[in-house]
Image (tube, helix red, strand yellow):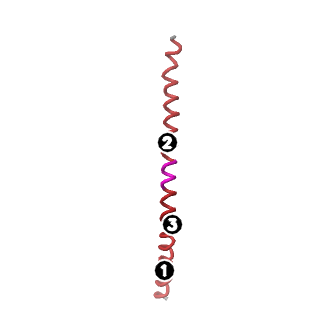
């Protein structure tokens, strides 16, 4: 009986660490999913903005030289 009581806090701590790491994995997966969704939604806009940025740099270079 005493040995079980001595080990129970340790087992509890191990269990908490497992659940905590599981929660962290779930949260990180949700964050990755959100980022993936945002990228899929906004990739065409980023592409368009990138083209505009390159064009503006070319125009600036043409004006300077």
Q: For label 2, count other residues whose C-alpha is less than 10 Å away and answer few (under 14), some (14-19) or many (20+).
A: few
Q: For label 1, count other residues whose C-alpha is less than 10 Å away and answer few (under 14), some (14-19) or many (20+).
A: few
Whether residue 9 appears in magenta in the rendering, the answer is: no
Residues in magenta, as a range = 29-34
Task: Report the front residue among 63 and 20.
Answer: 20
Q: In this view, does 15 lie above or below 32?
A: above
At horizontal 51% and vertical 78% (from top left) the residue drawn is: 54
Which badge, 3 or 1, comes first in the chain's sequence?
3
- Find out whether the residues at labels 2 and 1 contact each other: C-beta distance under 8 Å: no
Task: Report the front residue among 24 and 38.
Answer: 38
Which badge, 2 or 3, comes first in the chain's sequence?
2
Q: Is mark 1 on a helix, strand or loop?
A: helix
Please name which of the two marks, 2 or 3, marks the residue nearer to the observer.
3
Q: For label 3, count other residues whose C-alpha is less than 10 Å away and answer few (under 14), some (14-19) or many (20+).
A: few
> Disc number at residue 24?
2
- Find out whether the residues at labels 2 and 3 contact each other: C-beta distance under 8 Å: no
Whole-number angstrom distance, CA of label 2 to CA of label 3:
28 Å
| Residue 39 placement (x, y as % from top left) | 50, 61
Task: Report the front residue among 13 and 45.
Answer: 45
Q: Which residue position is annotated with label 3?
A: 43
| Residue 40 placement (x, y as % from top left) | 51, 62
Which secondary structure is most common in the magenta stretch?
A: helix
Please name which of the two marks, 2 or 1, marks the residue nearer to the observer.
2
Q: Which residue position is annotated with label 1?
A: 57
């Amino acid at each position: 009986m005493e040995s079980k009581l001595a080990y129970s806090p340790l087992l509890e701590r191990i269990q908490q660490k497992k659940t905590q790491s599981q929660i962290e994995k779930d949260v990180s997966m949700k964050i990755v999913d959100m980022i993936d969704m945002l990228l899929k939604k906004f990739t065409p806009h980023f592409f368009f903005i990138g083209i505009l940025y390159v064009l503006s740099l070319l125009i600036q270079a043409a004006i300077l030289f």
